[in-house]
């Protein structure tokens, strides 16, 4: 019999997407083939403590994993000769591959990837540079615009610059972007936390204040009206694009409530785009993926505006993996099951 792969799933984390990460990880762990993998689980609490846990998937999903008596403090070691985990009482566990199921900062942004690079352990998803560039929406936009992809007009400021001259900056934003409404976002965020759609200068001021609570760097964008589309991309050197998905948010935009709470939000496979437009969108997703130097996986999000133009929105290097998440769902639509997809992701990680 072939030896099992010692796979470590890391979940939780200190970002505002802690809960979503736990749910994504629970879905993945539940579907991993026990014949193929020896599964280890490290949860990172909201406070940042690393815990090796044997909690069941339901407990990971609902957050009660943290209270388990058998939990042990442990962390991935940067020591290459160890190639794995060291627990507080000195036990060393060899790990073959890591699946970081961490959304947002300090997980999706290259930091954990950097630790895994030091430790010499293969991991699922893009590398350090790519992860950090994709996490920062301002950096992504600058890189993407160099390649000529269409995207909303945008303006980048930071907490300090803004507070030194709020009036001047507000006027400058209006001059550069044009007509309201605008979207205001923290540069490093996710799950729509800290994002608002604003309709006038007072709203803009409040939106910047709210975004500044999440990150010191803030982006203001022209609002695009049209459809919201997403494409899953998978692969290392020859990445492939999935079917095109569409978000039908229950609210005015896909805010946190619409994403995770409001049951009236829907997602579907966009089958009415016509073969040519669909191909264009898929091929643009792969181009963005390559521009951002991704490997393993990423989900690329677009708008299709009222003139039928493809407008880039953002790229996620560790997309959601919950039961209803788009990344796996779009592959399932093309015949690649959730189980096969996670096997493939682990294979791609170990190939590198
Ligand atoms: N420029 C824009 N025009 C129209 N809608 C937008 C724009 N930017 C963001 N949105 C809406 O806000 C949501 C969240 O923004 P997004 O940039 O995707 O951040 P997050 O990383 O939090 O998902 C999008 O899914 C979309 O509904
Ligand atoms: Mg998004």
Image (cartoon, grey):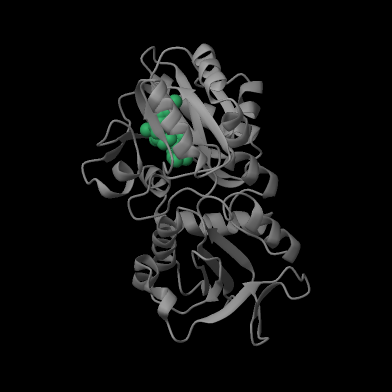
Q: Give the x, y percent position of residue 220.
A: 50, 26
Q: Can residue 229 be seen in this view?
A: no
Residue 130's image quarter? top right
* Residue 283, position as x, y percentages in the image: 52, 28
Q: Residue at x 52, y 16 (%)?
A: 171
Task: Name the image quarter holding the N terminus.
Answer: bottom right
Q: In which quarter of the image is residue 147?
A: top right
Q: Nearer the viewer, residue 117 or 279?
A: 117
Relative depth, front residue between 214 and 299:
214
Q: Is residue 232 above or below residue 337?
A: above
Q: Is residue 18 above or below residue 261?
A: below
Say which residue appears at 62% left-offset and 59% top-offset: 123
Q: Is residue 271 left or right of residue 72?
A: left
In the image, 317: left or right of 306?
right
| Residue displayed at 52% across by 12% down | 175
Question: Residue 314 location in percent, x, y?
Answer: 51, 34
Image quadrant where one finds the C terminus: bottom right
Residue lying furthest right in this view? 81
Q: Where is residue 103 in the image (x, y as percent from the top left)?
A: 50, 52
């Amino acid at each position: 019999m072939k030896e099992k792969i010692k796979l470590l799933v890391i979940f939780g984390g200190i970002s505002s997407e802690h809960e979503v990460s736990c749910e994504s990880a629970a879905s993945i762990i539940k579907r991993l083939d026990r014949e193929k993998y020896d599964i280890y689980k490290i949860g990172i609490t909201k406070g940042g403590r690393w815990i090796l846990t044997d909690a069941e998937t339901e407990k990971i999903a609902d957050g009660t994993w943290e209270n388990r008596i058998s939990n042990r403090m442990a962390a991935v070691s940067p020591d290459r000769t160890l190639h794995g985990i060291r627990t507080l009482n000195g036990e060393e566990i060899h790990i073959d591959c890591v699946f970081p199921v961490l959304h947002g900062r300090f997980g999706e942004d290259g930091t954990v990837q950097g630790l895994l690079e030091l430790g010499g352990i293969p991991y699922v998803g893009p590398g350090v540079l790519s992860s950090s560039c994709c996490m920062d929406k301002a950096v992504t936009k600058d890189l993407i615009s160099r390649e000529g992809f269409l995207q909303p007009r945008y303006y980048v400021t930071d907490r300090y610059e803004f507070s030194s001259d709020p009036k001047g900056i507000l006027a400058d934003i209006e001059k550069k972007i044009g007509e309201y409404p605008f979207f205001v976002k923290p540069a490093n965020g996710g799950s729509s936390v800290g994002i608002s759609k604003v309709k006038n200068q007072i709203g803009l001021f409040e939106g910047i204040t709210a975004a500044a609570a999440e990150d010191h760097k803030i982006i203001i964008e022209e609002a695009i009206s049209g459809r919201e589309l997403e494409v899953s991309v998978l692969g290392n050197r020859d990445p492939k694009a999935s079917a095109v998905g569409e978000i039908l948010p229950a609210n005015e935009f896909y805010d946190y409530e619409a994403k995770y709470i409001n049951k009236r939000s829907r997602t579907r496979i966009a089958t009415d785009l016509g073969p040519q437009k669909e191909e264009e969108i898929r091929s643009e997703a792969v181009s963005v993926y390559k521009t951002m130097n991704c490997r393993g996986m990423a989900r690329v999000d677009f708008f299709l505006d009222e003139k039928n133009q493809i407008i880039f929105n953002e790229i996620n290097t560790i997309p959601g993996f919950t039961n209803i998440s788009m990344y796996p769902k779009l592959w399932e639509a093309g015949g690649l099951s959730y189980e096969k997809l996670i096997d493939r992701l682990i294979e791609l990680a170990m190939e590198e």
